[in-house]
């Protein structure tokens, strides 16, 4: 089974091709956030370099979030278009699942964090249970201090990963003594990790409904601002 996987939920744009247990190729760009321009050329180039065409692809995998609202919509729309055009299934995988999977050999708690602006992060908690990632906390937005308080209560070694470390690593080091940190190359969502998770599901006949939507966890800023103004108007009335 040959899978094309991609992620555009953050600043990173990444595409990978997997064939059963082998990674055929992977592109990662962590420079620009122009996913609408970058993704299709990346897909075309990786297919060409692997001597494949889109007709050879048996299924597609994409990140469903959390992450950038615009990036998630671009990635999902790209995969839905390819899936519909080729009449092949696709499946969406949590961005946090993919980050955790990259460090799944860690014996303690795995804590991916993605920047959610201000002092908030998108996070979830996992633990390796006989080579299966057990979910200890469902994906949620949390204040960083609230997350650290929760982890202190668990009293276990914790490995952090994700782009939230660019902003919060020093603070975590100062305020949480049981912290470990993934190497830099694993702090980004990799299409290869998404692909491995999705490949196993697609092989078992699990795939998404064409109407599936990204997981934003937070409402778009424009919607939050509108709600805030409406509440202010109600207070004035």
Image (spheres, helix red, strand yellow):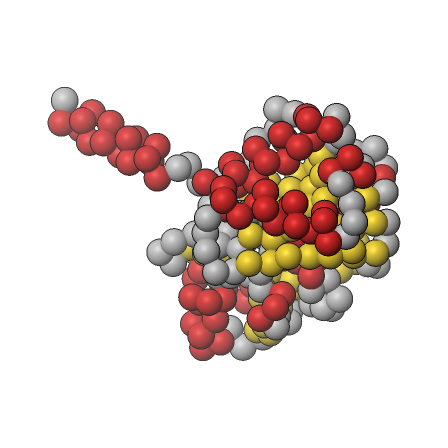
From the viewer's perspective, tell me whether residue 225 is left or right of residue 36: left
- Relative image position of residue 104 (x, y in whole percent): 73, 62
Instruction: Report the residue at 28% width, 31% height from top.
Output: 226
Q: Is residue 210 visible?
A: yes
- Relative image position of residue 120 (x, y in whole percent): 42, 55
Instruction: Report the residue at 44% width, 60% height from top.
Output: 144
For the residue pair 101 and 39, the one nearer the viewer reads as 39
Instruction: Report the residue at 45% width, 51% height from top.
Output: 33
- Relative image position of residue 142 (x, y in whole percent): 46, 52
182 vs 19: above or below:
below
Q: Quadrant of the N terminus?
A: top right
Q: Quadrant of residue 90?
A: top right
Marker count (numbered):
0
For the residue pair 201 and 45, the one nearer the viewer reads as 45
107 vs 190: above or below:
below
Q: Quadrant of the C terminus?
A: top left
Q: Quadrant of residue 213?
A: top right
From the viewer's perspective, tell me whether residue 153 is left or right of residue 219: right
For the residue pair 162 and 90, the one nearer the viewer reads as 90
Q: Is residue 192 visible?
A: no
Instruction: Report the residue at 46% width, 48% height from top.
Output: 34
- Relative image position of residue 223 (x, y in whole percent): 34, 32
211 vs 173: above or below:
above
Q: Quadrant of residue 158?
A: bottom right
């Amino acid at each position: 089974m040959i899978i094309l996987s991609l992620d555009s939920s953050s600043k990173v744009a990444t595409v990978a091709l997997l064939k059963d247990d082998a990674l055929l190729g992977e592109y990662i760009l962590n420079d620009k956030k122009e996913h609408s321009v970058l993704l299709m050329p990346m897909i075309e180039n990786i297919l060409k370099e692997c001597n494949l065409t889109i007709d050879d692809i048996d299924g597609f995998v994409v990140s469903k979030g959390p992450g950038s609202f615009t990036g998630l919509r671009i990635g999902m729309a790209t995969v839905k278009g390819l899936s519909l055009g080729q009449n092949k299934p696709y499946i969406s995988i949590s961005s946090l699942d993919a980050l955790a999977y990259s460090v799944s050999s860690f014996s303690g708690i795995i804590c991916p964090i993605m920047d959610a602006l201000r002092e908030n992060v998108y996070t979830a908690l996992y633990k390796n249970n006989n080579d299966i990632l057990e979910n200890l906390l469902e994906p949620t937005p949390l204040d960083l201090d609230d997350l650290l308080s929760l982890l202190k209560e668990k009293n276990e070694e914790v490995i952090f990963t994700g782009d939230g470390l660019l902003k919060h690593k020093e603070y975590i080091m100062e305020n949480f003594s049981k912290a470990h940190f993934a190497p830099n190359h694993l702090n980004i969502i990799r299409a290869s990790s998404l692909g491995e998770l999705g490949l196993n599901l697609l092989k078992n006949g699990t795939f998404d409904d064409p109407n599936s939507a990204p997981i934003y966890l937070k409402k778009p800023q424009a919607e939050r601002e509108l709600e805030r103004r409406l509440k202010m108007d109600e207070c004035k009335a």
